[in-house]
Image (spheres, grey):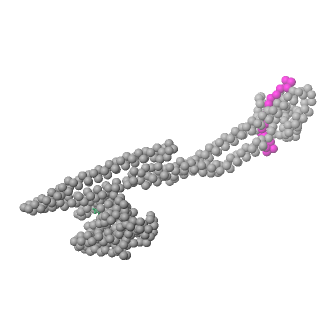
Amino acid sequence: MLKPRFSISLRLTLWYGVLFCLGGVLFGTAMWFNLKRTLTGERRGTLTRRIDRLESLLLKNQNGDLERAFRGFAHATGNGLVEIFEPGGQRALPSPSDAASDFAWPSVQGTRKVRFEEAESDGQQYWVMLRPFTLGGHAYILAAAAPEAGNQLVLDNFWTGLWESVPVFLLIASASGYWISRRALGPVDRITAKARSISIRNLSERLPVSSAGDELQRLAETCNEMLGRLDASVNRMKQFTADASHELRGPLSFTRTVAEVAMRRPGIDAESRAAFREIVEETAKATTMLEDMLTLARADANSAADALGQVNLAAVMDETCEAARRIAGEKGLEMSVQRAGDGQVAVLGDAASLRRLLWIVLDNAIKYTESPGRVSVKLDTRPAGRADTGWGDAVLEVSDTGIGISEADLPHIFERFYRADPSRSEVDGSGLGLAIASWIAELHKARLEVVSQERKGTTFRVLFPLVDARVAAAHR
Ligand code: ADP
């Protein structure tokens, strides 16, 4: 699957920034054209009014001194840019000002209706208006001009301002885009963190649901419904395992007792006795497996989390090793037990569970080591510094010189019913021992570690939090 390179919030920020900026520039450009149209309209209005006034002046003075009146009018307009042309292009009256006579008027020939156009004179842009006019049956073209410079300056300033504001636009847009996306996607982070923490052990927990009524709320609710269904199914499976193990215990122990009684009956032939012995042995194994399954079923239901008290791990170790030493001896294995200190290693725990944990690891060490070989048990303490409690560790280590565990098997050995290699089926076992051991370790807030090398041996290490003096006093 292709991994996205940008987070959604970053992409939203970029999109928002670009779109907002583009919108700003488009809006600015539209405003610029609008301004230009308004200014042009305003110029046209000024020129129209000017020619209107010229028309009324001509009408009023048609029988008087037209030339003087025209000159007076031109001076009154400020820039003096007015002219009266014949339709052929010649001036009907002399130019009223130097500015008008020097001005590069556009050709007036063929002007039959009002014309409004741009012209350049002396390096400057102008708007020119030409309008036909009839006075006393004679046709004229009235012309007036106004400079564009003022308008152009306004338009140029507007345009420069628009482009200068682009980075500011971009910054504001990106910042608001980021803020909006963080706000919108904040719940996603919370949902992700919670979803990550949910596993088969805490399926009853649920994702946080906002009350925004949005898609994220629907997503969280849908995931929670799915978690609910999964939880119910897993609970049914757990219940089934617990019930089945429980129900099978009775018939199994009955079978075993019957076989034991039959085996001891006098006069039974050797073949039948061997068959009954096999039944007894197999039912014993099946009973152990059922007990293990029940233990795990209870662990799943958390019903075995009995109150923990202060336990001397050194004493638990001595007791358990005593029993293991006999079995190891029978198998021709050397066994060494080593412990530091004065024989007092206080941990918070349940003595029976701790014995079981140590027994599982010890039993495996003996089972998977061939003679001649050695099993070593070591108990030591480490100074304070655990990340979770700040206390020290009691380190219990069981090493063997046995067959070892392959790298491929190592990550799976704590799974239920996992047995490393089919060839090991020669060794009795159910594949449940280490699953129970890791549950007991978890119950004691202990860390269960393993290092192994094939054909060299295996070391299991359990790190228990040492009880500090104050806690020890409270549990004494
Ligand atoms: P089992 O009943 O099979 O011993 P466990 O859960 O105790 O089940 O162990 C799981 C698997 O881990 C074993 O089948 C075995 O392959 C491997 N294993 C455990 N301890 C050792 C050990 N000390 N040396 C070699 N293999 C081991």
Q: Residue 287's spot in the image, x, y percent?
A: 23, 58
> Is 349 situated left or right of 368 in this image?
right
- Give the quadrant of residue 315: bottom left
Q: Residue most toward the left? A: 267
Q: Main secondary structure of the magenta part?
A: strand
Is residue 128 magenta-colored?
yes
> Is 73 situated left or right of 432 in this image?
right
> Is 44 situated left or right of 30 in this image?
right
In-front residue for pair 149/211: 211
Q: Quadrant of the C terminus?
A: bottom left
Is residue 218 magenta-colored?
no
Q: Which residues are magenta?
A: 119-138
Q: Residue at x 45, y 67 (%)?
A: 390
Q: Residue 421's spot in the image, x, y percent?
A: 28, 62
Residue 357 can be seen, yes or no: no
Q: Residue 361's spot in the image, x, y percent?
A: 31, 66
Q: Residue at x 45, y 53 (%)?
A: 194
Q: Residue at x 71, y 45 (%)?
A: 158
Residue 337 can be seen, yes or no: yes
> Quarter for ligand 1?
bottom left
Q: Residue at x 80, y 35 (%)?
A: 47
In-front residue for pair 260/155: 260
